[in-house]
Amino acid sequence: MASALGPSAEDSCLPEAAKKRPLRSGSTLGLIAGGSRFPHAVATAARAHGWRVVGVGFAPDTAPDLPQLCDAFTWLRLGQLGSLIAFFHNHKVTHVVLAGPISKPRALSLVPDLRAARLLLTLRQRGDDALLRAVRQELEAEGWQVIGADHFLPQLLTPAGILTRTQPTPQQQADIALGWEVAAALGQFDVGQCVVVREGIVLAVEAIEGTDATIARAGGLGGPGAVVVKRAKPNQDRALDLPAVGPTTITAMAQAKASCLAVEAGGSFFFEIDAAIREADAHGIAIVGYTP
């Protein structure tokens, strides 16, 4: 399976869209960094391919050691869109990438600067995808090309097929299909990416609380044996926000006694996939890189 930073034999199993390679070296990447170690992986891969990396982070979401991997870095608070744009211009950014999550409940209390306030006034709704699309338009209006993190880390995209020793049962396969369609329907309203199903009953859908909390809630409501489905929203801008899972997802499932994870193959990030598969096998959890 894929490692955290390097390609593997699994690359050959990915669809063509997943086999992206970095754009030309010598460019300057503006990295808008959220939480987790994902921004570290993007910065490391970009620099390995000859890019300069100019980073922007948001405490407490962004890890404090990320600046060490950047050629230039600044800390901002959420909502300082004008300051972010000025910083990128000052450092001759040519391309922009977003990597890592931001706490959604904390984002509700952001204090926008003038540039961000004008942007928010144009939005009819403020779901993840709507907000990210608006930010992308602002960045591209400045002359920057917004690219997906998979340009630098295609090996982190979820491979297709059953990834664990544990095989999904026919009932779990039916629950995956149901969860897939429910997630698509909810995604049209820019709600969430995760749905939890057990024996044809929808136990929980993801809103602002995040995937792990959704899994925990479903376990409390429906008991053991639930199926967790995670997929991109139908109209989601995949350069800005792909679904992501990893070992913490499997830990949350084990605690909730969930039995199967289905995540979109080639359209989601799977972090530390080897560790996640080992943990899933230890708990008898099936993992499926799903294509309908």
Image (cartoon, rainbow, N blue to C red):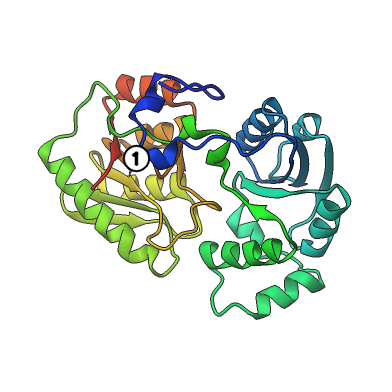
Q: Is residue 258 above or below residue 279?
A: below
Answer with left or right where residue 222 lies relative to residue 271: left
Q: Position of residue 28 (x, y in %)?
A: 76, 42
Q: Residue at x 38, y 50 (%)?
A: 217
Tell me if 184 is positioned left or right of 39 in this view.
left
Q: In which quadrant will I find the N terminus?
A: top left
Seen at 16% across and 48% down, the residue is 199
* Residue at screen point 28% across, 24% down: 164
Three-letter code for the amino acid on which mark 1 is drawn: Ala
Q: Position of residue 114 (x, y in %)?
A: 81, 73
Q: Furthest residue to the left?
A: 170
Q: Nearer the viewer, residue 154 or 24?
A: 24
Q: Quadrant of residue 106?
A: bottom right
Q: Secondary structure at mark 1?
A: loop
Question: Is 176 above or below relative to 6?
Answer: below
Relative image position of residue 133 (x, y in whole percent): 57, 64
Which residue is denoted by mark 1 in the rendering?
265
Of the pair 243 and 137, the residue shown nearer to us: 137
Badge 1 crowding class, 10 Å Cα cut-off, few under 14, some 14 to 19, many 20 or more, is many
Q: Residue furthest right?
A: 90
**Residue 155: image location, x then y, percent:** 47, 29
The number of numbered badges drawn on the structure is 1
Residue drawn at (67%, 62%) of the image = 140
